[in-house]
């Protein structure tokens, strides 16, 4: 009976190890300003930090170029323009917004996005700001790989 209990304990431990083996959330560098809801360039190391991404995120992004958000509402129009490097987790939303198609290939490529709706930021009237980007997007898949 004691041998049976020991075997059960060993198998239980082995199953736990196997269950947690490979469970790893990717860590990417992220601009500090994004934590405040702002899109600002973060070229210098003191302007970004490591952040654990959602478990469904498998890529990090480094975006270098000109980003513009045009928001037309009943109260008027606003334009937000950011030029320079930004860093973030490569969520499926971000990848789709930047026209990074499946299957995702790591590396850098030129991207030109025109009037993509920012569906994650709806206006009170149900409309969406429009996102424009022209520049280079680098996609990588290791922890904090979007720093260089």
Image: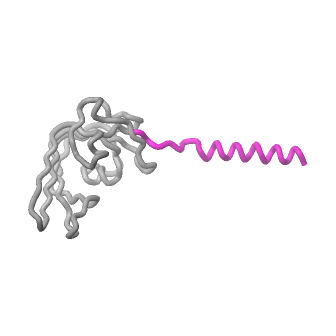
Q: Is residue 117 inside the magenta stretch?
A: no
Q: Which one is nearer the viewer's eye here, 55 or 45?
A: 45
Q: Residue furthest left?
A: 76
Judged left or right of residue 132, residue 12 is right
Q: Residue furthest right?
A: 1
Q: Is residue 18 above or below residue 74?
A: above
Give the magenta range. 1-27
Q: Count all numbered tags in the image, as a single digit.
A: 0
The colour scheme used to paint the residues is one colour
Q: Is residue 12 inside the magenta stretch?
A: yes
Q: Residue at x 71, y 43 (%)?
A: 13
Counting from the top left corner in percent of width and height, residue 45 is at: 29, 29
Q: Residue at x 9, y 62 (%)?
A: 76
Q: Quadrant of residue 35?
A: top left
Q: Looking at the figure, which quarter contains the C terminus?
A: top left
Counting from the top left corner in percent of width and height, residue 105 is at: 33, 42
Q: Residue at x 53, y 44 (%)?
A: 23
Counting from the top left corner in percent of width and height, residue 144 is at: 38, 34
Q: Is residue 122 above or below residue 86?
A: below
Q: Which one is nearer the viewer's eye here, 114 or 121?
A: 121
Q: What secondary structure is the magenta-colored segment mainly?
A: helix
Q: Residue at x 17, y 58 (%)?
A: 130
């Amino acid at each position: 009976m004691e041998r049976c209990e020991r075997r059960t304990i060993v198998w239980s431990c082995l199953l736990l190890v196997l269950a947690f083996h490979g469970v790893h959330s990717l860590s990417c560098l992220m601009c500090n300003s994004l934590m405040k809801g702002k899109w600002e360039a973060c070229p210098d190391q003191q302007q970004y930090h490591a952040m654990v991404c959602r478990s469904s995120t498998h890529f990090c992004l480094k975006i270098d170029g000109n980003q513009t958000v045009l928001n037309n509402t009943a109260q008027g129009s606003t334009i937000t323009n950011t030029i320079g490097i930004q860093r973030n987790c490569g969520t499926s939303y971000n990848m789709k917004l930047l026209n990074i198609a499946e299957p995702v290939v790591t590396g850098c490529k030129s991207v030109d996005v025109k009037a993509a709706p920012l569906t994650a930021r709806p206006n009170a009237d149900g409309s969406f700001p429009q996102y424009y980007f022209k520049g280079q997007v680098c996609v990588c898949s290791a922890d904090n790989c979007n720093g260089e």
